């Protein structure tokens, strides 16, 4: 008699199982990759690389060569597999948010570009992050985004921008700008009062310290400001 447990084990071991691999080639046009299977280090053929979303909304994010991925074989067929998901490991760790200084927490979503490609040829040190690269971080109550020394913050009650030492905040009280001047090549129109704490210039003439010519007693008009 045959031991059914041994028969089942033999059948299972004869079928291709999910396994880990390292991306060795990338085809961005077809969103496909080749993978060096681990630990055998045998290169696969072209495999579909799983997408976040396809259809009327499409999200494409091809991996770098050297990315650690999970390979799943369709119906246990070794000739037909899918590089299902990329995986963080001890070499390539999750990025930290420029806004919070921490990796994304449960309930958050973080995208950071320019983190450096995975190490080549089995190296143990990830590439250096590119300076001024853009990033985007959604937390439970705030959306942050930025690039270099520019950062944008959106909450339920305000939207704020900061570039270097210049800041701008839009909230229910209006728009406030600090640390810099306002310049426009078009007109400025105000339905309310325009207030200058120090002075107001019109064609270079001070509204605070100008003088009037032709001042006469009675009901005459003065000349233009000087």
Image: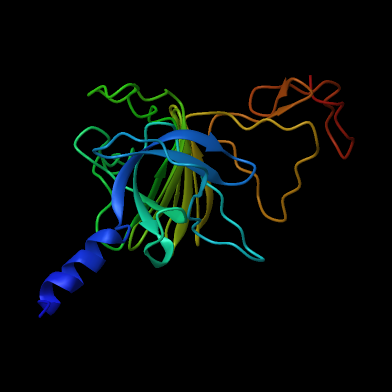
Q: Is residue 62 above or below residue 198?
A: below
Q: Is residue 6 above or below residue 48?
A: below
Report whether 89 appears left or right of 33. left
* The N terminus sits in image quarter: bottom left
Nearest the camera: 105 or 170? 105
Give the residue displayed 51% in from the left and 39% down from the top.
177
Q: Is residue 99 visible?
A: no
In percent of width and height, residue 174 lies at 54, 55
Q: Is residue 1 above or below residue 10?
A: below
Give the residue displayed 37% in from the left and 57% down from the top.
72
In percent of width and height, residue 81 lies at 44, 55
Tally of marks: 0
Report whether 99 appears left or right of 198. left
Nearest the camera: 28 or 14? 14
Nearest the camera: 150 or 158? 150
Nearest the camera: 164 or 115? 115
Report whether 31 appears left or right of 110. right
In percent of width and height, residue 117 lies at 39, 28
Report whether 19 appears left or right of 110. left
Q: Is residue 37 visible?
A: yes
Give the residue displayed 26% in from the left and 22% down from the top.
123
């Amino acid at each position: 008699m045959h031991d059914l447990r041994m028969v089942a084990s033999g059948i299972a071991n004869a079928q291709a199982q999910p396994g880990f691999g390292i991306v060795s080639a990338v085809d961005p046009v077809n969103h496909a990759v080749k993978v060096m299977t681990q630990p055998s280090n045998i290169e696969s053929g072209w495999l579909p690389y799983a997408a976040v979303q396809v259809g009327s909304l499409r999200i494409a994010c091809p991996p770098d060569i050297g990315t650690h991925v999970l390979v799943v074989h369709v119906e246990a067929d070794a000739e037909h597999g899918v590089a299902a998901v990329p995986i963080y490991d001890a070499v390539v760790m999750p990025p930290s948010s420029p806004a919070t200084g921490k990796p994304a927490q449960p309930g958050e979503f973080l995208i950071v570009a320019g983190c450096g490609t995975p190490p080549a040829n089995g190296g143990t040190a990830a590439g250096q992050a590119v300076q001024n690269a853009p990033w985007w971080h959604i937390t439970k109550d705030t959306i942050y985004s930025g690039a270099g020394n520019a950062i944008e913050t959106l909450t339920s009650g305000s939207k704020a921008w900061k570039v270097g030492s210049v800041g701008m905040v839009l909230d229910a009280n209006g728009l406030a700008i600090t640390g810099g001047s306002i310049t426009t090549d078009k007109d400025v129109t105000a339905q309310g009062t325009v207030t200058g704490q120090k002075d107001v210039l019109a064609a270079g003439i001070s509204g605070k310290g100008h003088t009037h010519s032709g001042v006469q007693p009675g009901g005459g008009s003065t000349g233009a400001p000087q």
